[in-house]
Image (cartoon, rainbow, N blue to C red):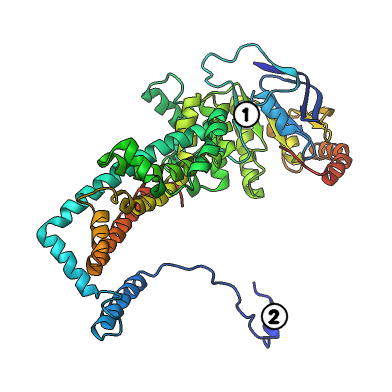
Amino acid sequence: MDLNLRNITHRYDEVEVLRDINLDIKQGQIVCIIGPSGCGKSTLLRMIGGLERPASGEVLQLGDPPADCLNPLTYIFQDFALLPWRTVEGNISLVLENHPLDAAAREEIIADVLARTKLSDFRKAYPRQLSGGMKQRVAIARALSVRPAVLLMDEPLSALDSQTRELLMDDLVDLWEKENYTAAYVTHNLAEAVRLGHKIVVLSRRPGEIRDIVEIAMPLSDRTSENLELEAIQKRLWNLMRDEARAADMELVDER
Amino acid sequence: MSDKSVEDTLTGKPVPFRGGGFLPRPKKIVAPIVFIGLIAFWEWGCRTGFISPLILPAPSEAFEAFMNLVNTGLLWQHLAASLQRLLIGWFSGTMLGIIVGTLIGLFSIARSGLQPLVSAIFPIPKIALLPLFIIWFGIGEGSKVATILFGTFFPTVIATYGGIDNVDRGLIRMGQSFGLTRMSIIRKVILPGALPAILSGTRISAAIAIILLVAAEMIAAEYGIGAYILIAGSLMATDQLITGVAILSCLGLIFAWIIGRAEKYFLKWRA
């Protein structure tokens, strides 16, 4: 299943936040969306998943999601969004409970995603007992449990310290190698973008417009930390963004 | 590896400590000591004539009155009558309060319509409405329960919708993004999220229920702790009055303890 964004424009009251966004998200591709803070990239992601309605334009699903998919467009949030009153397995079972699955099927899915995210030993733990990185792993496990067609990740690593971020990034790369998931990945971190993105969309500051789309053909597994080609791309992206970021930094923010 | 240059010049003075403090911790033995000390001082004052018996009866006299209640079996009749009113009034007031509070927390129409009404009626002393309650609910148990019900209803409403307002929007959005039904989001995300606020609301409403018990039993009650206190008061039997007040205070402690246990159980997911 591919996604196609057509002429998306959005405004909060009188403030235009997004202008004429056109974008394709192809199956098996990770599309990174970067831009200075307040450029509307998180808003755009909410629109892709149907949590917010654009003022004009539309998001189209091309083709049907796989038959076993329970929740085609699934988010991974920056702040994890785990229910603190449920254990790890309870948080995963939460998103399965509305689907017609019997207890055994549900249990099978939970055990499977916990194993895939190396969380099997933490089944009964409460979120408060887990580190930030673990919490995000639980959120990833929860997202995988509904067999999404597209993962929508809203700065999933931004709340973590830099070491944990590296570890989780490796996990996301490994996972992609294995499962070839489709994702829209919003971040303000250029290093994350060049590490994970098959396609990097650079948004300008408010109102967010697409300034450039950079495609990186290099396979994810080859993207090591000291790679000259990636560094060159990252530099190029930064040059694109620098003035925008500086201007955005000087703006007064009044979001929502 | 140590920093040699520091070791070479070991002549400095230690940095003065200026952190710590501002963290009162409960010490288990202090409370009983204060309690016993206060009662001992009171008893001592009465025995020596330092406190005139007209002003305050000695604790031993109050205890005698209490034993008298126990021995005649009247205590259980009073307690049974009061507890029944308290529990029915408090339980139904809390339940209704949670329901109305949830409506206000979830629906715009309920919020616009009921919130001002709640703010308008909450501050009215329910004792002032006693005559109306008697007319509406009769002179029997109805008006007594209604007084407690009304008293506990409003704080629960406010605690409930306040708790719902404070539920993390991110969690609700998460529920929506996974396609949970509206009912599931209410049941599994919003209500558990509001539970801490609801439980602390029940603490307040339990205290209010006990306060209103005396008021409720002003209405032609034969039995009940409140009635006992009122009769003692009108007879200037201060020893019985102190006994009755002490019983109410114990009731309050027991309720607070039960709610504390409930909090421990339902909110074990918190630190």
Q: Residue under mark 1: which chain is it in?
A: A
Classify mark 1: helix, strand or loop. Answer: helix
Q: Nearer the viewer, residue A44 or B262?
A: B262
Q: Nearer the viewer, residue B202 or B228?
A: B228
| Residue A104 lies in quadrant | top left
Vertical comparison of B34 with A4: above or below: below
Give coordinates of residue A12: x percent, y percent: 76, 30
Residue, far top? A63
Whether residue B266 can be seen here = no
What residue is rendered at 55% in x and 36% in y?
B171
Q: CA distance from mark 1 to mark 2?
A: 52 Å
Residue at numbered disc 2? B6
What residue is rendered at 65% in x and 32% in y?
A153
Give coordinates of residue A246: x percent, y percent: 86, 44
Q: Crowdedness of circle 1 by 10 Å Cα count: few (<14), some, many (20+)? A: few
Q: Tell me the quarter of the image containing the N terminus of chain B.
A: bottom right
Give coordinates of residue B167: x percent, y percent: 54, 40
Q: Is residue A234 left or right of residue A192?
A: right
Residue at numbered disc 1? A177
| Residue A243 lies in quadrant | top right
Vertical comparison of B199 with B238: above or below: above
Vertical comparison of A240 with B65: above or below: above
Q: Which mark is residue A248?
A: none
Q: Is residue A183 left or right of residue B247?
A: right
What residue is rendered at 75% in x and 35% in y?
A194
**Nearest to viewer (mark 1 / mark 2):** 2
For the residue marked with disc 2, what is the amino acid?
Val
For the residue marked with disc 1, what is the amino acid?
Glu
Q: Nearer the viewer, residue B159 or B247?
A: B247
